[in-house]
Every structure is written in C-alpha cells, then in structure tokens.
Amino acid sequence: MENNPSQEGAAAGESAPHIEKHDAAEGSCYRVLGVWTAAALTVRPVWEELTASLKNVTRGGPGAEALWDLRQIEQLDYLGAQVLWNHWGRQWPAHIEMEAAQRAVLDRVAQFSVDRPAVPRPGFKEAFLSLGKGLLDVFDHAADLLVLVGRLLLNLIKLARKPSDGPWRDLSGHLYHIGATALPITALVGFLIGVVLAYLISQQLKQFGADAFIVNILGISLIRELGPVLAAILIAGRSGSAITAQIGVMRVTEELDAMRVMGIAHSYRLVMPRAMALAVVMPLISVWTTVAALIGGMLAADLAMGITPSFFISALPAAVDAANLTLATAKSVVFGVLIALIGCHFGLRVKPNTESLGQGTTASVVTSITVVILVDALFAVLFKSIGV
C-alpha cells in the first residue's frame, strides 16, 4: 500500500488524531488521543479517516453515560477543539475529564460558536416578493430614463436659443472617438456578415435556379435590417460601455460632485453632447456598415454564383426601394440616441466604488443591445408595408 508523503511526515513526528472506545461496568469511555491541531487535521487522509471514525462514535449529550477523556491529547488547538465541539452537537457532554488548558480552549470555542440559522426554502411568497422587487427596479430605471429624456429636450431648447454657449468642443471630440475610430471594425464585421449571408443564400437559390434574386434578398436584408442593427450593436458594445465607464469614473473620482458644486448641469455638459454625437454618427456608421456588407455579399455572389459586380450594382436600385434607406436612417438616429441615453443613465447611477462601476458598465451594454433589438422589432411591425 502506497503511503501519502504528507501523512508519513505527520506520523513520523506526531501521532494522528483518533478516538478509542473502552467499555466498562460504569459505561462507555471515549479516549481522545493524538495531535488535534490544524497541521494534523488538514492532511486529507488523516481527516478522511477521522471523519469516518467519528460517524461510528456515539455523541455524548446531556444525560448520556459516556465519559470523554481528553487528558491524553498530545496537542489541542482551536481547530481540533472545534471538531470535537461540533461532534458533541455544540453542547457539553455529561461526563468529561480534561486539563485546565484544554478547558480554556474548549470554553473559547463554545463561547464563539453560533448555530447558523436554517435558510428557509423559497416559496410562493419569496418568489412573489422577488418579482415585485424586479418590477420596482424596472420602473425606477424607466422613471430615471424618462427624466433624462425630458432634460435632454430642455437642454436642446436652451442650445437652440443660445448656440454660442453650447459644448461644441465636447461634441466634436465625441464625433471623432465614437464615429471615426469605429469605422475599421464596423467595416470589417459588415464585410464578413455580407460574405457569410451571400454564401448561405446562394446555397438555397441554386436549388431553384433563382440566382438573380440574391440581389433582392441581400439588398432588403442588409439595407433595411442587418446594417442598422449590426452597427447599433457594435456601437452599443464599443461606445455605450465607454460612455458608462467615463461617467462612472467621474463618480468614483468625485468629479460629478465637483460639477454640481460649481453649478454645471450634468445633463447639459455630459448627456447632451454624447446624445447629439451618436444621433449624427449612427446613420453614417449604418450606411458605412451596410455598404461594406453589400461589397462582401457582391464578391461572394460573384464567386459562388457568377453574379458579376456590374449586374449586382445595376440591379440593386430596382430591387430595393429608396424608402428602405430612409427607414434605416431614421432607425439609426433613434438607436444612437437610445444608446447614448442608456449609457449616460447607468453612468450617472454608478456608486463611488469600483464594483458598482463594473456592474453599471455590464448592465449598460446588455440593456443597450436589448433595447436596440426591441425597438428594431417595433419598427419592423409598424413599417412592415413601407419600401417592400
């Protein structure tokens, strides 16, 4: 039988903790022997053997005839005393013999050992209360977001009355960081989506000899739906999280409090420039992503089905009505404003600690993407007969 090296080391220097039972006329006697310390008890084979032996030992509760003799323990620390105390059911045996030092250790363990309250199983009441709490949280977020929209409208009126005092420098910076720096990644993703979509569509159209209809399918799907939604999801994950993180860091570093003391409105200097920038940038990024996707689909159609780029470009205006582009542009403006408002909303709700900052950023991205998809579905239902 192969011995554990750590067990051999423990056995060589000190005996393993164990309990011996002796039966006498007066009753059973349990002698606690060995070293009951953390160093000995944390050896896995020793702990497993001791646990198995404890299951076969009768616990000595009040009134029990068993005698517990602890005088032959070589060493006893708080971990060993806790093991014995738990085995006794967190109460003293009726008959026990021990040294004064052992009594002090066990008294200390008994003093600070508190029974854990039983965790009630969740029932209908708990589920109902949890649902109510979730609904209240949703209403709270919706109310704050509605207030943010109202302040944005008032700030736009204020800007229209006095444009010279507008935060134009902030707006130009957001236009660059949100728009220009996002062009490479949106073009790459759009191109790849177009290639994948064209290859999948070509496999189905070949079965019916309807190769030319790939222009109609790609045009409608990319210009009307996938282009704006894909661009909005990328911007929500890229810029929406950045907006929440920027404002959240300002909360952690107390810059928002400093702005309030100086009389600078958060909605005017933080929310409005970002909302305006995304309202301007999102339609442009949407068109950019759609064009990249159409180029990828056009090249894939040429390779997979022999549809030349010249035929694709000439057939696209006839296949896709101009109203689809108008609808896509309008959706992109709405997506941009919603992403900015949600990012600012969660950023302003960040508490002055890093944990809240991470949670707010995650919630901002998830909420933005969810809202974008829901609003796109709403647009699809309301304008289903336009441009088709």
Image (cartoon, helix red, strand yellow):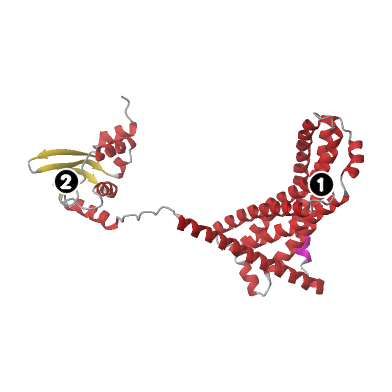
Query: Total number of numbered labels?
Result: 2
**Residue 67 located left or right of residue 142:** left
Say whether residue 388 is left or right of residue 185. Answer: right
Q: Secondary structure at mark 1?
A: helix
Tell me the crowding category of disc 1: few under 14, some 14 to 19, or many 20 or more residues within 10 angstroms, Cα based: many
The chief SS type of the magenta part is: helix
Query: Which amino acid type is marked by label 1?
Result: Ile
Query: Does residue 370 appear left or right of residue 277 in this picture?
Result: left
In the image, what residue occupies the spot 58% across and 58% down? 357
Tell me where residue 200 appears, x and y as whole percent: 76, 34
Q: Position of residue 360 (x, y in %)?
A: 60, 57
Q: Secondary structure at mark 2?
A: strand
Determine the image quadrant of residue 270. bottom right
On screen, residue 210 above or below 158:
above
Is 196 colored magenta in this rendering? Answer: no
Q: Which residue is label 2 attached to? A: 68
The range drawn in magenta is 168-172
- Say few, some or many: other residues with alpha carbon within 10 Å of mark 2 (under 14 / 14 to 19 / 20 or more): many
The percent position of residue 83, horizontal first and vertical second, equals: 27, 46
Question: What residue do we see at 65% from left, 53% from top?
Answer: 365
Q: Nearer the viewer, residue 204 or 338?
A: 204
The N terminus lies in which quarter of the figure? Answer: top left
Residue 349 appears in the picture as rendered: no
Foreground pick, 18 / 104: 18
Q: Which residue is mark 1?
A: 223
Amino acid type indicated by mark 2 = Trp
- Residue 300 disc label: none
Left or right: where 198 falls relative to 138 = right
- How far across and down, in percent of the image, does residue 35 sit? 24, 41
Q: Residue at x 67, y 66 (%)?
A: 146
